[in-house]
Amino acid sequence: MPYRKELADVANRGLERIIRDRSCTGAAPAASSARIMLENKQLVHFSSNDYLGLANHPLLKDAAAGALEACGTGGMASRLMAGGTTYHHALEEAIARLKGTEAALALNSGYTANTSLIPALAREGDLILSDALNHASIVDGCRLSRSRTVIYRHRDVAHLRQLLASESGTRKIIVTDTVFSMDGDIAPLPDIVTACREHGALLYIDDAHGTGVLGGGRGTLHHFGITPEPWIIQMGTFSKALGSFGAYVAASRTIIRWLINSGRGFIFSTALPAPVVAASLAAVELIERDSALNKKLWENRNYLADELHKIGIDTAPSETPIIPVMVGDIETTLAAAQKLFDQGIYAPAIRPPTVPTPRLRITVSAAHTREEIELLCTLLKEVMK
């Protein structure tokens, strides 16, 4: 049987991935984004990317229901074949406003965005400089382009400058995550932007974990007070802090026009369904007018970090609601995750090849209560023993 031997090897090393689907029906549906039902057990969810708790917000649900009634369930065709709706146009205007750019474009997922946009922006003869810990979708987007890709050491701007000076390319494009999804640290964008100016490079940032989280919700450029220049391309998702699904790119009108004409994942994909787009639009508008959830998120993040420090857990290098907790080797990490599960906490083990070092990837949200955070810390203290 094909792949049986390979699968056995993966399983023997404790690296086999399995799917656990949450239940959305039954006696105890999840009314809060901080709670999920798995295997008939209600758990506090400390592995979600729903940082603001918007996935169960009534405004998003009402917006989706209204669009469902008006437009139905499917996109029916690609955007270039009239698969979009007025909801799509309104969402793109809202994202451009949120990100401070001339225009924006909605795409079907973060993975689709990076594997479509990077090849459209970088062609044969160009040079891509990519952070060593960039997301897999960025890595694959670089591979799909016909450009030469050179890796710079993680967050090492001195190394990046050396490469900008020594490596040649028709265009030079720096590509980086803004918030790194497994360590929770932030790219040094001010220094990277300065390096771009000095060398005439384009900057492509993946703000998937920064949008809704940093800069009062507006993202990492706003966090650092950086003006969104025409040579900066901002990509991000609706599927994390915005509680919906899909992705966006925000940039100059010229860049967006080019991507409409060259981004294969945009051109050849059916448009996102209107209910999903309407939910995303409601989330963006909520972030624009109300900072309460963002403030709550950071109160919870700082409280959790302080409590973890008290029990001797080092939260470095995290600067965000993503906090990796190293508990040991693969076997120890799997056992720790199971112990938390048994006690009502969902924080699964993250293992190679996703990360080089196994860990519990803890994420905190605005939806968590103090009691839930305290429960996590109490159980982690026991696990660390």
Image (cartoon, grey):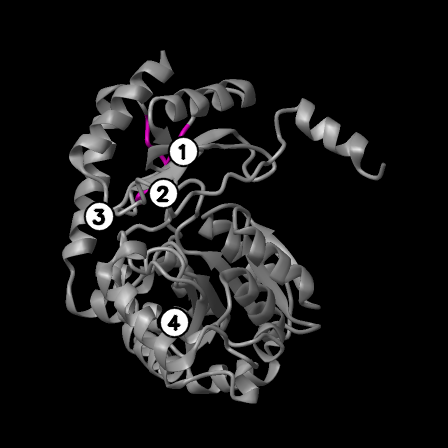
- Dot in front, 4 or 3: 4
The image quarter containing residue 58 is bottom left
| Label at residue 26 | 2
Secondary structure beneath label 1: loop
| Residue indicated by mark 3 | 297
Name the residue nearer the viewer: 36 or 350.
Answer: 36
Count the marks: how many?
4
Amino acid type assigned to the residue bearing label 4 in the image: Pro
Which label's residue is closer to the chain start, 4 or 3?
Answer: 4
Q: Residue 324: say if magenta.
A: yes
Image x and y of residue 16, in percent: 63, 32
| Label at residue 133 | none
Residue at 53% in and 30% down: 357
Task: Name the side, left or right, on which 194 lies relative to 227.
Answer: right
Residue sitting farthest toward the top: 385
Check disc 1: other Cα within 10 Å, few if <14, some if 14-19, many if 20+: few
Q: Residue 365: say if magenta.
A: no
Image x and y of residue 250, in percent: 41, 74
Label 4 and label 2: CA atoms lie apart by: 24 Å
Check disc 3: other Cα within 10 Å, few if <14, some if 14-19, many if 20+: many
| Label at residue 275 | 4
Which label's residue is closer to the chain start, 1 or 3?
Answer: 1
The image quarter containing residue 208 is bottom left
- Dot in front, 2 or 1: 2
- Dot in front, 4 or 1: 1
Which label's residue is closer to the chain start, 4 or 1?
Answer: 1
Amino acid type assigned to the residue bearing label 1 in the image: Asn
Task: Please tell me whether residue 344 is drawn above or below residue 142 in the rendered image.
Answer: above
Residue at 40% in and 26% down: 341
Label 2 and label 1: CA atoms lie apart by: 9 Å
Label 2 and label 3: CA atoms lie apart by: 29 Å
